[in-house]
Image (tube, grey):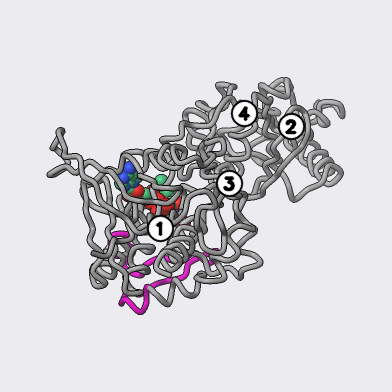
């Protein structure tokens, strides 16, 4: 009897890998530990699923902090236009929004899951849910089979041990963030048991906690068009321009998320991380000084505190008064040149000290994973174990928001499925 290709994990990467291998005529079994596949896909893009991005290859790869070169063959094989064509061929209409983000026209991530599941089933993929894989068995350095626990349903606490022989195994168990979706980091143990190395795991695309209690006062404040610089142990390392948000514990928003995995890694190595917010990035120090001089003169009779309304969002005024040390009832015309310089520096360099990232369970992605040098990027095959393949977030891949992470899961899944079938 022919042994099947066994795919472990029915997320974005697993569903497309299973369907691809089955569409090439192979017998495929997909083992998913949750009671239905695609749980994480269902919450992507706030339930709308930003499944890819229309950026050109040269731009697209710039959004990857980890895995950029590794992904080249996978993207070459199955890239953003191929993915859009695939979904449209399956009857799913798509829309492209601001920043090239692609969503289903229905605004429903469930439709994306349905397309993938139906496509896999059409090609006779045997999808076994409530099936949690515990071990990949080897014989002479080659995949032999998979041990898993099968439950009757998600309330069944006993579960029966099962074994399935496998011709090849594709490991697509995802990362370790949002564990309620089933992505609990099992793939790190499963591949680690086979001798694969796992890089340091840390939260990616995650909000940050800040030491100063200033943030709880600023909760709900959204700053648009600010420049955020990351200072590590007193050295400027990264910066990003755009929107950020204050929350009860610290900060979030697009530019914070996109810098977060870098910051989380720095904090892991116990570095001191400070953020410098330039609230007036459009004005250099000279121009800003002239503007302040004009405002202080023109409104010389106003209290300093009231003057700030023209310069800052209301919620930031108390922080500015407190941190610059300028008396709130000082008249504008009495603010000295030295005080003006303090104010200018504060507006160009409002500092926050980051204490920690929010936990991995709240991160959009897991930064880190299976060591890329142990996987052949042309096939997604393990370089250590024969007939073992990897795809998706279980690998050490990490990209920004905008549809890039899902495209990486789909591209590597497609390539792994095709390679295993070959
Ligand atoms: C809130 C949120 C929003 C997001 N929005 C977007 C977005 O809009 N666009 C985007 O590009 N990316 C987004 N992402 C990231 C994206 O969801 C992931 O990068 C992507 O889902 C990774 O796909 P994957 O198939 O590798 O893993 P997953 O989708 O995590 O799938 C892994 C599957 O493996 C199963 N599994 C795990 N262990 C076992 C085991 N032992 N046995 C059997 N099965 C197992 C899990 O149950 C799960 O179904 C978002 C993530 C989150 C958390």
Mark 1, Cα crowd under 10 Å, few <14 / some 14-19 / many 20+, is many
Dot 2 or dot 3: first in sequence order is 3
Q: Mark 1 highlights which residue? A: 13
| 127 versus 85 height, above or below | above
Dot 1 or dot 4: first in sequence order is 1
Alpha-carbon span between mark 4 and mark 2 = 25 Å
Q: Position of residue 279 (x, y in %)?
A: 68, 41
Q: Which mark is residue 267?
A: 4
Alpha-carbon span between mark 4 and mark 3 = 16 Å
> Residue at position x 26%, y 45% from top?
33
Alpha-carbon span between mark 3 and mark 1 = 23 Å
Seen from the viewer's position, the closer of residues 89 and 257 is: 89
Q: Mark 3 highlights which residue? A: 258
Q: Nearer the viewer, mark 1 or mark 4?
A: 1
| Magenta residues, start to end | 87-111
On whether residue 9 falls in the magenta region, the answer is no
Q: Circle 1 — which element?
A: helix
| 294 versus 77 height, above or below | above
Q: Circle 4 — which element?
A: helix
């Amino acid at each position: 009897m022919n042994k099947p290709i066994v795919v472990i994990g029915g997320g974005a990467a697993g569903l497309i890998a299973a369907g691809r291998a089955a569409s090439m005529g192979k017998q495929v079994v997909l083992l998913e530990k949750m009671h239905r596949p695609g749980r994480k896909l269902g919450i992507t893009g706030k339930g709308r699923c930003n499944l890819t991005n229309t950026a050109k290859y040269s731009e697209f790869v710039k959004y990857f902090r980890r895995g950029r070169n590794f992904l080249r063959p996978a993207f070459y094989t199955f890239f953003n236009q191929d993915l859009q064509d695939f979904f449209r061929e399956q009857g799913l209409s798509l829309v492209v929004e601001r920043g090239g983000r692609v969503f289903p026209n229905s605004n429903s991530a469930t439709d994306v899951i349905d397309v993938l599941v139906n496509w896999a089933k059409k090609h006779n993929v045997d999808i076994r849910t409530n099936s949690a894989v515990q071990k990949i068995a080897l014989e002479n350095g080659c995949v032999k089979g998979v041990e898993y626990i099968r439950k009757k349903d998600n309330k069944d606490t006993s579960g029966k041990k099962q074994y399935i022989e496998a011709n090849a195994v594709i490991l697509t168990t995802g990362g370790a963030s949002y564990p309620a979706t089933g992505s609990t980091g099992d793939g790190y143990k499963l591949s680690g048991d086979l001798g694969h190395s796992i890089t340091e795991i840390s939260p990616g695309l995650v909000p940050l906690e800040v030491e100063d209690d200033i943030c709880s006062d600023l909760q709900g404040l959204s700053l648009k068009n600010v420049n955020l610089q990351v200072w590590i142990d007193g050295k400027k390392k990264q910066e990003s321009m755009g929107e950020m948000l204050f929350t009860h514990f610290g900060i979030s928003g697009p530019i914070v998320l996109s810098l977060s995995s870098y910051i989380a890694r720095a904090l892991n190595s116990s570095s001191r991380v400070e953020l410098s917010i330039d609230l007036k990035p459009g004005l250099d120090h000279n121009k800003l000084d002239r503007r302040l001089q004009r405002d202080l003169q023109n409104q010389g009779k106003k209290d300093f505190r009231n003057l700030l309304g023209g310069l800052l969002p209301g919620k930031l005024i108390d922080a500015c008064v407190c941190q610059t040390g300028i008396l709130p009832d000082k008249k504008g015309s009495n603010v000295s040149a030295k005080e003006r310089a303090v104010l200018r520096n504060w507006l160009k360099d409002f500092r926050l000290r980051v204490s920690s990232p929010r936990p991995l369970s709240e991160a959009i992605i897991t930064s880190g994973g299976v060591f890329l040098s142990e996987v052949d990027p042309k096939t997604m095959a393990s370089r250590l174990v024969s007939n073992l393949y990897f795809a998706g977030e279980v690998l050490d891949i990490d990209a920004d928001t905008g549809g890039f992470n899902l495209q990486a899961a789909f591209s590597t899944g497609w390539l792994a499925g095709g390679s295993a079938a070959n």
